[in-house]
Image: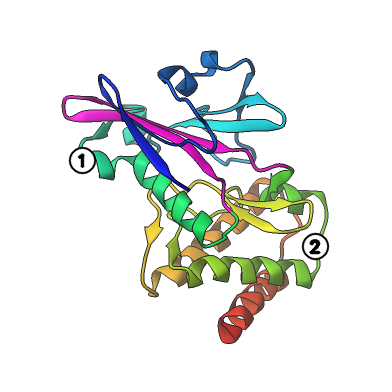
Amino acid sequence: MTETVERTATGAILYDRAIISQISASHFVPQGWAHAEQLTGEMGSGGRGNTMLVGNVPRQFVLRRYRRGGLIGKIVRYHYFWTGENETRSFAEWRLLAKMAEFDLRVPRPAAARYQRRGTFYTADLITVTIPKVRPLSTVIAEAARNADFWASIGAAIHEFHEAGVYHADMNAYNIQIDDNDKLWMLDFDKGCLKEPGPWQQETLNRLHRSLKKICTINPMLHFSTSNWEALLAGYFAASRSA
């Protein structure tokens, strides 16, 4: 994957020519595409209306404008404090995704990233290639109970990311996606990075566990139990021992 940076009047665009041969500001707004539809969250996932599915089959993309969450997001939605081009949310995530693609990890392929600076603040956007036929883990386990082998495979796949040093800032039941072959894909690496092994690995597992328990309170019919979590951990640590 080769990155190309083009300067604009207010910032810059980073992109992969192998995916998008020519790039312009129009690619970063829904109106610039022949087809665009909003992607929303489910079961309290916090989908904030800032993500669009754009383009047409067979080449579709996900266009995301970075938007703040939490209390500060109620006051300042899209603006971040400028600390340098390489620190922008969009460029950092694009490059992390590119590095993970080199590791052959199952993540969206980055297509283009943009920032627009105004004084001490900037806004950011990211375009990634759509992963076909994936659904959130939350959806998969809402439909039917899955056996121990399924949960163990989830744990083993998470270990694959951890072994590569990939830190996901918000690993939850929505950012973990499952394809038709029950393979795990991981989305949304905003604020993610590469790290040396450490306590963060257990912390991200704990975050996922809290996410699964939380959605069970939203949908009591969800197929998730203590034994499922134990199977996930068994798969994780089995992969650790064989690494």
Residue at 22% x, 35% y: name it: 81
* Above or below, 50 relative to 195: above
Other-residue count near label 1 (Cα within 10 Å), few / some / many at <14 / 14–19 / ≥20: few
In whole angstroms, how far apart are the C-alphas of marks 1 and 2?
46 Å
- Horizontal placement of 215 versus 73: left or right? right
Q: Which residue is mark 1?
A: 84
Q: Position of residue 45 (x, y in %)?
A: 57, 41
Number of disc labels: 2
Residue at 22% x, 29% y: name it: 121
- Kindly tell me whether residue 162 is visible in this rendering: yes
Query: Would you say the residues marked 1 and 2 are in contact, meaning their CB atoms lie under 8 Å apart?
Result: no
What is the span of residues highlighted in magenta in the rendered image? 107-132
Q: Amino acid at mark 1?
A: Gly
Q: Secondary structure at mark 1?
A: loop
Please tell me which residue lies in front, 47 or 82.
82
- Horizontal placement of 19 versus 15: left or right? right
* Above or below, 238 relative to 2: below
Q: Secondary structure at mark 2?
A: loop
- Horizontal placement of 217 versus 24: left or right? right
The quadrant of the picture occupied by the C terminus is bottom right
Q: Position of residue 169 (x, y in %)?
A: 42, 54
Q: Seen from this angle, which residue lies furthest bottom? A: 241
Which badge, 1 or 2, is on the more N-terminal residue? 1
Q: Position of residue 7 (x, y in %)?
A: 28, 27
Q: Position of residue 234 (x, y in %)?
A: 65, 79
Q: Which residue is mark 2?
A: 146
**Residue 125 within the magenta-colored segment of the rendering:** yes
